[in-house]
């Protein structure tokens, strides 16, 4: 468990660095068929009305929820991933040296 927390903490620090250095085009997207449009608006509501939902260019049946800017991604997306995605992701395999 301690290794997982350290791994997650390192991942968040690296992601924060990447987002900081690429401020010009930092974007988080979720795409859905028009039948799942309510899912995209759920993200918008969950993230306190941040971001936008638009039709994908050239694909009238596909819609995209987009949140732009590293500050908004750090404020909304990273905590969401940390709370709802990371706990259900694959666990890091321990090396043999950790058992000795």
Image (cartoon, rainbow, N blue to C red):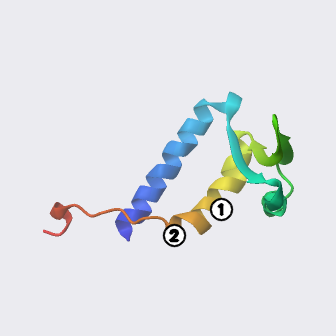
Does dot 1 land on a helix, a strand or a loop? helix
- Which quarter of the image is occupied by the N terminus? bottom left
Q: Which of these two is toward me, 9 or 25?
A: 25
Does dot 2 land on a helix, a strand or a loop? helix
Count residues near mark 2 (Cα–Cα under 10 Å), then give few for <14, some for 14-19, many for 20+: few
Q: How many marks?
A: 2
Evaluate if marks 1 and 2 touch, with contact meaning CB atoms under 8 Å apart: no
| Disc number placed over residue 87 in the picture, else none | 2
Image x and y of residue 72, in percent: 74, 47
Q: Residue at x 51, y 47 (%)?
A: 13
Q: Residue at x 71, y 55 (%)?
A: 76
Image x and y of residue 19, in percent: 61, 38
Q: Residue furthest left?
A: 100
Q: Residue furthest top?
A: 24
Residue 1 lies left or right of residue 45; in this view the side is left
Q: Which of these two is toward me, 53 or 46?
A: 53
Count residues near mark 1 (Cα–Cα under 10 Å), then give few for <14, some for 14-19, many for 20+: some
- Which quarter of the image is occupied by the C terminus? bottom left
Q: Is residue 36 above or below residue 20?
A: below
> Which residue is labeled 1 in the image?
80
| Disc number placed over residue 92 in the picture, else none | none
Q: Which mark is first along the chain, 2 or 1?
A: 1
Image x and y of residue 69, in percent: 73, 39
Image x and y of residue 30, in percent: 71, 50
Instruction: Determine if residue 47 is in view.
Output: no
Q: Residue at x 85, y 47 (%)?
A: 52
Instruction: Determine if residue 18 is in view.
Output: yes
Q: Is residue 32 above or below residue 22?
A: below
Q: In 3D space, how far apart are the residues under numbered discs 1 and 2 (Cα atoms)?
A: 11 Å
Q: Residue at x 51, y 70 (%)?
A: 88
- Residue 94: image quadrant is bottom left
């Amino acid at each position: 468990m301690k290794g997982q927390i350290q791994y997650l903490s390192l991942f968040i620090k690296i992601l924060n660095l990447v987002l900081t250095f690429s401020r010009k085009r930092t974007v988080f997207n979720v795409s859905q068929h028009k039948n799942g449009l309510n899912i995209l608006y759920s993200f918008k509501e969950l993230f306190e009305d941040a971001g936008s939902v638009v039709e994908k260019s050239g694909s009238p049946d596909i819609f995209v929820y987009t949140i732009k800017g590293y500050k908004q991604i750090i404020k909304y997306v990273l905590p969401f991933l940390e709370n709802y995605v990371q706990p259900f992701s694959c666990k890091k395999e321990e090396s043999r040296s950790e058992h000795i």
